[in-house]
Image: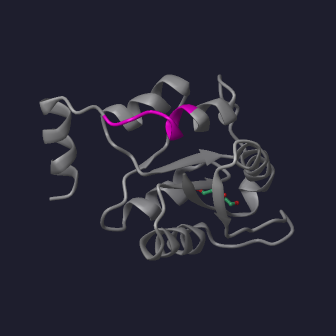
Amino acid sequence: MKVVMANDHGGVELAKKFLDYLNDKGIVVTYLGVDSAEKPVDYPDMADKAVKEYDAGNYDYGILVCGSGIGISVAANKHSGIVCALPQNEDVAILSREHNGANFIAFGGRVNYPDDPVSMLDRFLHTPMSLEDRHVRRRERLFK
Ligand code: RB5
């Protein structure tokens, strides 16, 4: 598995936890930063960089983190071919793969999740898309 990850200054600490998890699991990650909360950046720039890298390389997933998760997920979803989930909990992280076929996932580094965000990421990365007709049909409509 190969993933690309980017975050703004609001997502540094959570991105570090994700990096530890990815490295522990042997998941290949291209990390685009930023690696310090003292380096303010604009979240649309970090989303754009991650999507550009995702499109250029042979990546399975993109992972994004900003303060709330909202700005960076909206920016990613403006790109053709990207379905960026912003899950509230582990169940929704799973559904975002099964039903929506999300290829990106966003988190808020300043959000108190009811579940461990590392577990949410793990479930996202390891849940296949449902091949049931209704889900395939609805997913196809996301790209029209
Ligand atoms: C940056 O302060 C903050 O606005 C950003 O990380 C994010 O929460 C935007 O949606």
State the residue at coordinates (69%, 28%): 116
Q: Is residue 11 visible?
A: yes
Q: Nearer the viewer, residue 133 or 2?
A: 2
72 magenta-colored: no
Q: Is 69 displayed left or right of 32 in the figure? A: left
The image quadrant in which ligand 1 is located: bottom right
State the residue at coordinates (74%, 51%): 19
Q: Quadrant of residue 63?
A: bottom right
The residue stretch that appears in magenta: 123-129
**Residue 139 location (% of width, % of height):** 22, 44
Q: Nearer the viewer, residue 88 or 16?
A: 16
Q: What number of labels is visible?
A: 0
State the residue at coordinates (31%, 63%): 81
Q: Is 19 displayed left or right of 96 in the figure? A: right
**Residue 52 location (% of width, % of height):** 48, 75
Q: Nearer the viewer, residue 5 or 27?
A: 27
Q: Quadrant of residue 42?
A: bottom right
**Residue 56 location (% of width, % of height):** 45, 77
Relative to 44, is 115 above or below?
A: above
Relative to 15, is 114 above or below?
A: above
Quadrant containing the C terminus in the rendered view: bottom left
